[in-house]
């Protein structure tokens, strides 16, 4: 796929978090982004390795560096990035102290900084002073928009005529966004039009044309922003399919998400992302993951819409375990199961085409 960039070259900071759930923003940017041309990842644990090889077992020519200094030295003046992107996604969205040191270093070197965390850089006087001195741009992607920029729910979602699929998950950090992108790209490759509606900061960083950041939004306007974004994607692009990225999961104790998407986007059907080897909610030992069938039942009762497929996250699984796991899910739920990251989305696209309006 030919990639154009919105904001030029970037380095992704993900020290000691790459290839873990806390590095999911970096993972998204390594796999796909049109916002940046990713020149490398910073994580001393995997320094010297290829980011794609570490993450998915396939080289993608994005090197991992041990530090910002080393990255800039090895990339050279002709490949100097314009932006340092914070690729961390820790529980609670807090910015580690070590990351602040690297941010200051990047600003002193003239790099812009983009962060999707809840610790806003614009509130840090020292960081902003360095940014102003070096004429650098700071973007806090999760910064709450002013109320006059937000939309209230109107009901116009009922005018959307294309197929709408919500990609929800049984947990947070389980691959919903990645699967959504894979489906959209496969749908486009098949000759039909598809749009991704992003609902988190990483989708925006990946260049999603239509996105809102759900957990930066004031509660009264969450439904309206979801509706407005889905409606705009349909009105402006007239796609055959819109895939709406889920957030958290209905039963996650810290990130209960998905209800707003079901209520406001009013999807026609739901696809549910699941990690068969995950037994507890991410980051919360002792909080047992609710069974897959129970989560399917909850979605269908709340929304009145059917879950039509399960997509599999193969974390902690050998390749030989994936297809048997899919078969087990189908036997237990009666639903087709697909690992689109490992095997592609062609079979899932065939299924979705049968639901086209």
Image (cartoon, rainbow, N blue to C red):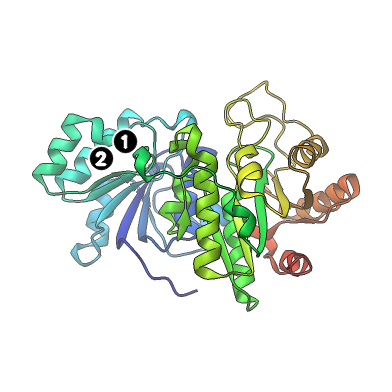
Whole-number angstrom distance, CA of label 2 to CA of label 1: 6 Å
Count of labels shown? 2
Residue that appears at 47% across and 64% down:
60
Q: Position of residue 281 (x, y in %)?
A: 65, 30
51 over 93 or under it: above or below: below
Label 1 crowd bin: few (<14), some (14–19), many (20+), radius 10 Å: some
261 over 52 or under it: above or below: above
Q: Is residue 287 left or right of residue 202?
A: right
Kindly indicate the quadrant of the structure image that contains residue 130: top left
Label 2 crowd bin: few (<14), some (14–19), many (20+), radius 10 Å: many
Residue 54 seen in this snapshot: no
Q: Residue furthest left?
A: 133
Q: Which residue is mark 2?
A: 103
157 over 290 or under it: above or below: below
Residue 244 seen in this snapshot: yes
Q: Is residue 343 left or right of residue 245?
A: right
Q: Position of residue 203 (x, y in %)?
A: 48, 52
Q: Which residue is mark 1?
A: 99
Q: Is residue 272 left or right of residue 37?
A: right
Q: Position of residue 282 (x, y in %)?
A: 61, 32
Q: Residue furthest bottom?
A: 191
Could you tell me which secondary element the residue under label 2 belongs to?
helix
Residue that appears at 49% across and 50% down:
27
CB-based contact (under 8 Å), mark 2 and mark 1: yes
Q: Position of residue 66 (x, y in %)?
A: 34, 46
Could you tell me which secondary element the residue under label 1 belongs to?
helix
């Amino acid at each position: 796929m030919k990639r154009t960039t919105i904001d030029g070259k970037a380095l992704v900071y993900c020290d000691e978090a790459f290839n873990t759930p806390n590095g999911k923003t970096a993972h998204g940017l390594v796999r796909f982004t049109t916002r940046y041309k990713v020149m490398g990842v910073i994580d001393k644990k995997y320094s010297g390795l290829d980011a794609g090889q570490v993450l998915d077992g396939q080289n993608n020519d994005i090197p991992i560096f041990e530090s910002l200094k080393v990255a800039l030295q090895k990339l050279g003046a002709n490949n100097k990035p314009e932006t340092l992107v914070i690729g961390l996604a820790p529980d609670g969205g807090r910015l580690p102290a070590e990351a602040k040191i690297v941010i200051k270093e990047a600003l002193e070197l003239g790099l812009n900084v983009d962060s999707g965390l809840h610790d806003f850089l614009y509130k840090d006087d020292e960081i902003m002073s360095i940014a102003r001195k070096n004429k650098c741009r700071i973007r806090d992607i999760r910064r709450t928009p002013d109320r006059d920029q937000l939309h209230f729910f109107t009901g116009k979602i009922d005018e959307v005529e294309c197929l709408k699929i919500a990609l929800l998950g049984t947990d947070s950090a389980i691959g919903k966004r990645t699967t959504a992108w894979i489906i959209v790209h496969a749908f486009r490759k098949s000759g039909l039009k598809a749009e991704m509606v992003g609902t988190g900061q990483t989708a925006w960083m990946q260049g999603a044309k239509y996105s809102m950041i759900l957990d930066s939004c004031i509660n009264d306007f969450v439904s309206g922003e979801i509706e407005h974004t889905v409606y705009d994607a349909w009105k402006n692009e007239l796609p055959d399919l819109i895939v709406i990225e889920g957030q958290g999961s209905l039963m996650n104790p810290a990130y209960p998400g998905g209800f707003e998407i079901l209520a406001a986007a009013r999807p026609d059907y739901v696809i549910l992302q699941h990690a068969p080897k995950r037994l507890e909610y991410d980051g919360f030992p002792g909080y047992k993951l609710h069974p897959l069938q129970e989560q399917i039942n909850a979605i269908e009762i709340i929304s009145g819409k059917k879950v039509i497929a399960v997509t599999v996250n193969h974390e902690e699984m050998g390749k030989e375990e994936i297809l048997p796991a899919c078969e087990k899910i189908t036997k237990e739920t009666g639903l087709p199961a697909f690992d689109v990251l490992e095997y592609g989305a062609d079979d899932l696209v065939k299924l979705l085409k049968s639901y086209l309006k």
